[in-house]
Image (cartoon, grey):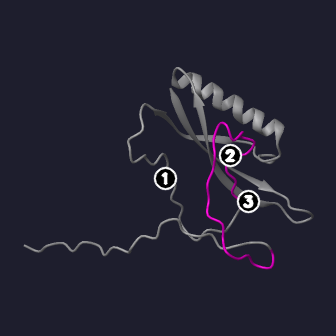
């Protein structure tokens, strides 16, 4: 059985000689196991290995399990595994997909921006733009 694990974390990090700044993030992991306990063991080992092999989570002290999804089947149109809503404007940040994952296991696709700012940053493209919907009016009766 396939399991999707959604995890989050928060930490403080120093960049150069600057003062420590708060950071937060999340990631999704996939494991195959006979049951949820086996999947959780694999996720824990994977996170330990990731923190030992890379500096990706170097300042992270705690990783939280937001959800663990057992994938019994996938509908033809797919499904959304996790939604995360945060209040306020996004402060920006860094995102990565499939770190240290062989292409034989998974492939990530993304849209490349047409131009970059002088500092190398770029404005992300929306994958889907939804029309604003007006709230339904309550009928008076």
Mark 1 vs mark 3: which is more N-terminal? 3
Pointer 3 local density, CA inside 10 Å: few below 14, some 14–19, many at least 20: few
Q: Outermost residue, left direction?
A: 141
Relative to residue 115, is residue 31 drawn left or right? left
Q: In percent of the image, x 79 and y 72: which residue is there? A: 120
Relative to residue 24, is residue 32 drawn left or right? left
Q: Which residue is mark 2?
A: 98
Residue 46 in the image: x percent, y percent? 70, 32
Pointer 2 local density, CA inside 10 Å: few below 14, some 14–19, many at least 20: some
75 is higher (above) or lower (below) than 2: below
Relative to residue 59, is residue 24 drawn left or right? left
> How far apart, in angstroms, are the residues tagged by discs 2 and 1?
19 Å
Relative to residue 72, is residue 44 drawn left or right? right
Q: Which residue is mark 3?
A: 22
Q: In percent of the image, x 49 and y 53: which residue is there? A: 83
Residue 83: numbered disc: 1
Q: Is residue 99 magenta?
A: yes
Q: In percent of the image, x 63 and y 25: which residue is there? A: 41
Which quadrant of the view contains residue 139? bottom left
Residue 39: numbered disc: none
Q: Which residues are magenta?
A: 94-119
> How far apart, in angstroms, are the residues tagged by discs 1 and 3?
22 Å
Q: In percent of the image, x 71 and y 40: which residue is there? A: 101
**In the rendered structure, are the residues bearing label 2 and label 1 in contact, judged by CB atoms less than 8 Å apart?**
no
């Amino acid at each position: 059985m396939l399991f999707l694990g959604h995890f989050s974390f928060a930490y403080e990090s120093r960049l150069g000689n600057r003062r420590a700044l708060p950071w937060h993030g999340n990631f999704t992991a996939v494991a195959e196991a006979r049951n949820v306990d086996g999947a959780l063991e694999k996720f824990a080992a994977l996170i330990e290995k990731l923190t030992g092999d890379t500096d990706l989570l170097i300042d992270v002290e705690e990783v939280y399990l937001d959800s663990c999804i057992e994938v019994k089947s996938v509908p033809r149109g797919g499904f959304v595994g996790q939604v995360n809503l945060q209040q306020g404007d996004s402060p920006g940040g860094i995102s990565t997909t499939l770190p240290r994952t062989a292409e034989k296991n998974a492939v990530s696709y993304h849209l490349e921006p047409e131009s970059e700012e002088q500092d190398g940053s770029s404005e992300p493209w929306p994958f889907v733009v939804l029309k604003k919907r007006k709230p339904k009016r309550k009928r008076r009766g």
